[in-house]
Image: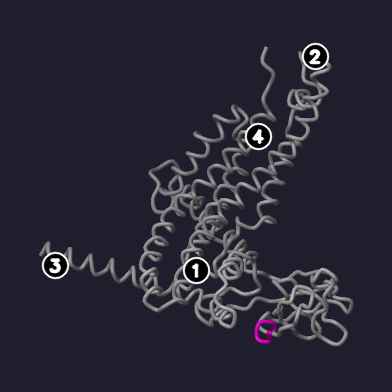
Amino acid sequence: MEFKSNKIKLLIQKSILVLVGFLTLNSVKASSSEGEEGGFKAGEMIMHHIADAHEIHIIGDFAIYLPVILKTDDGFKMFSSSHFYHNEKHAEDTVNNTSVHYYEYDGFIMSHEHIYYAADNGGVIFDENGKIANRAVTLDLSLTKNVVGIFFTIFLMCLIFFTVAKGYKKRGIGAPKGIQSFMEPLILFIRDEVARPSIGKHADRFMPFLLTVFFFIWISNLLGLVPFLGGLNITGTLSITMVLAAFVFIIVSFRGNKHYWMHILWPPGVPAFVKLILVPIEIAGIFIKPLVLMVRLTANITAGHIIILSFVSLIFIFGQQSAGAGYGIGVGATLFMIFMNFIELLVAFLQAYVFTLLAAIYFGAAVEEPHH
């Protein structure tokens, strides 16, 4: 019986390995076909998958097309992004001697997911540097896959926390059950190991924000690892991490006490000639700290996606040489992709923890009271 059990487990493991490899290859099938004429272009495929888009690519040719909402000279216009993606066109960039592909519909064009007005005679126009010179739309309020990902993350957070709150309301201080028993150690971890050691007695004031930002980043990172969700890269997008870092900057600026600002603008006990050097550095540090938060989170999350997609690219690069080489490198690449996905599970938690810890340290410095 034990032999059969081990055999079944081995068979399941092999099946999962083959399935993951097959699904991973299918997930980039559309991108690889785009470069058939000039050969497979790994850089374009990778940037396509980590960039935001107006569709959520599921598998193969199946995708969820998101609504395009534009504020134009004639008012608001709304239509499905499928009109763009089903009308692909090409134009010759004579400056760089390259062919540029774009999408066109109803007087608008979309290139690299940016939407512009089409030229008077349709299509695109280039400036002297070979860049698209079409006039951009007045305001683009379209739903993109990362925006949808944010809403989905918020929905999951509300579902989880309302369920946990309902459990506490029902059982009081009794032993937690279900998802409540999973969430309680995490909440206590943020409070006892992050907030209170870093902030001190004022820690509870900042707990709602710290919990929100921790679970938002963590859940967003986990969604980016789930297959068939379009390759969400929520916290790997600078505009999103910029908003998170901006919240930290605003809270530090408004909650900073007199002691905090005095040490920045006029450090006590420091000679005047040293203050001329130290004060500008301290002022610059006010803006550098949130900037570091933004760039560090974006770079770490995006790097993980790039590594995994790079090994996917190896399959197609070697496959162009011969089918045997493609299948051969595909086995190793698939194994390493599975390994990297497990590493990314750890990174997803670690990056949420580090962002929350650094935010707590900044808050602690802002509300620290003078020592007598």
Residue 13 horizontal/vertical position (percent): 28, 66
- Res. 125 image quadrant: bottom right
Give me the C-alpha separation between circle 3 and circle 1: 38 Å
Reading the chain from its start, which is encountered first: label 1 or label 2? 2
Q: In this view of the protein, which residue sits in the foreground, 232 or 270?
A: 270
Residue 194 horizontal/vertical position (percent): 53, 35
Give the number of the disc on residue 4: 3
Reading the chain from its start, which is encountered first: label 3 or label 2? 3
Q: Nearer the viewer, mark 3 or mark 2?
A: 2
Dot 3: what SS? helix
Reading the chain from its start, which is encountered first: label 2 or label 4? 2
Dot 2: what SS? loop
Residue 320 horizontal/vertical position (percent): 47, 77
Give me the C-alpha separation between circle 1 and circle 2: 58 Å
Q: Amino acid at mark 4?
A: Tyr
Q: Amino acid at mark 1?
A: Ser
- Which quadrant is home to the N terminus? bottom left
Dot 1: what SS? helix
Which stretch appears magenta? 84-88
What residue sits right under mark 4 in the picture?
362
Residue 122 horizontal/vertical position (percent): 82, 86
What residue sits right under mark 2 in the picture?
271
Q: Amino acid at mark 2?
A: Pro
- Res. 240 image quadrant: bottom right
- Which quadrant is home to the C terminus? top right
Reading the chain from its start, which is encountered first: label 3 or label 4? 3
Q: In this view of the protein, which residue sits in the foreground, 311 or 361?
A: 311
What residue sits right under mark 1 in the picture?
313
Give me the C-alpha separation between circle 2 and circle 4: 26 Å
